[in-house]
Image: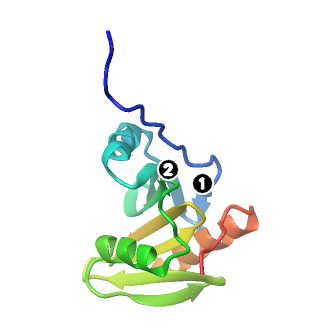
Amino acid sequence: MTTNAAVVHVAEVRPGLVPVKLQPNLSAIEDTALAPRFARAARTTLVAGGALWAIRDGAVLVGALQISLLKPEVNLAHASQRTAIVTQILPGSYETITVDGTSVAASATADETFFLWFSRGMFEVLQVKSGTGVSAESVVTQLISYQKSIGALQPIR
């Protein structure tokens, strides 16, 4: 039996890219149940794979981190491609800030703060709920600093 279905290779996020502990009381737990959704998305989007982490303060969900690996045809060296990704994902208007030497798009709603940054072949989106007592800026700084310290973050300028 022959099929015309294209074979889709799903990229996997590098293990250890996200620390298990953040701030004194926060933990980052990967939601491995979402892997099939990333595989389906790889068939019709520019995302080749990815993973999602729940950020918790004890049992309370305070945020989430999504890492999306891009297909090779996405050229992040072009500012227009990065801008297109940012404007499709972040709500409302955004500002560009620098976190530990990395350019980060930041946006906020009444309920959440969002950050998006790029590295070679991927982008990351952090969202932190408002009113939880968790500093969104501290979390994004910890994540970026950790990834830089292990040589995993290769910022796109």
| Left or right of residue 128, residue 144 in this image | right
Residue 30 visible, this orientation: yes
Residue found 38% across the figure and 45% down from its top:
42
Of residues 6 and 127, the one drawn nearer to the viewer in this rendering:
6
In space, the residues marked 1 and 2 are separated at their CA atoms by 7 Å
Give the class, few, some or many, for how many residues have Cα within 10 Å of label 1's Cα (few <14, many ≥20). few
Above-or-below relation of 43 to 157: above
Mark 1 belongs to which amino acid?
A: Val
* Amino acid type indicated by mark 2: Ile
Where, by quadrant of the figure, is residue 151 drawn? bottom right
- Numbered tag placed on residue 130 in the rendering: none
**Residues at marks 1 and 2 touching, judged by CB atoms closer than 8 Å:** yes
Residue at label 1?
Answer: 20
Residue 47: percent from left, percent from top: 42, 53
Report if residue 133 is visible in the image.
no
Q: For residue 56, what is the image quadrant?
A: bottom left
Q: Quadrant of the N terminus?
A: top left
* Label 2 Cα crowd, 10 Å radius (few <14 / some 14-19 / many 20+): some
Q: Percent from the top left, x then y, of residue 20?
A: 60, 54
The quadrant in which the C terminus is found is bottom right
Mark sitting earlier along the chain (1/2): 1
Q: Which residue is at a point 56% across and 74% down the rendered structure image?
A: 77
Of residues 9 and 134, the one drawn nearer to the viewer in this rendering:
9
Residue picked out by circle 2? 29
Kind of element beneath mark 2: strand
Residue 84 percent coordinates (x, y): 36, 75
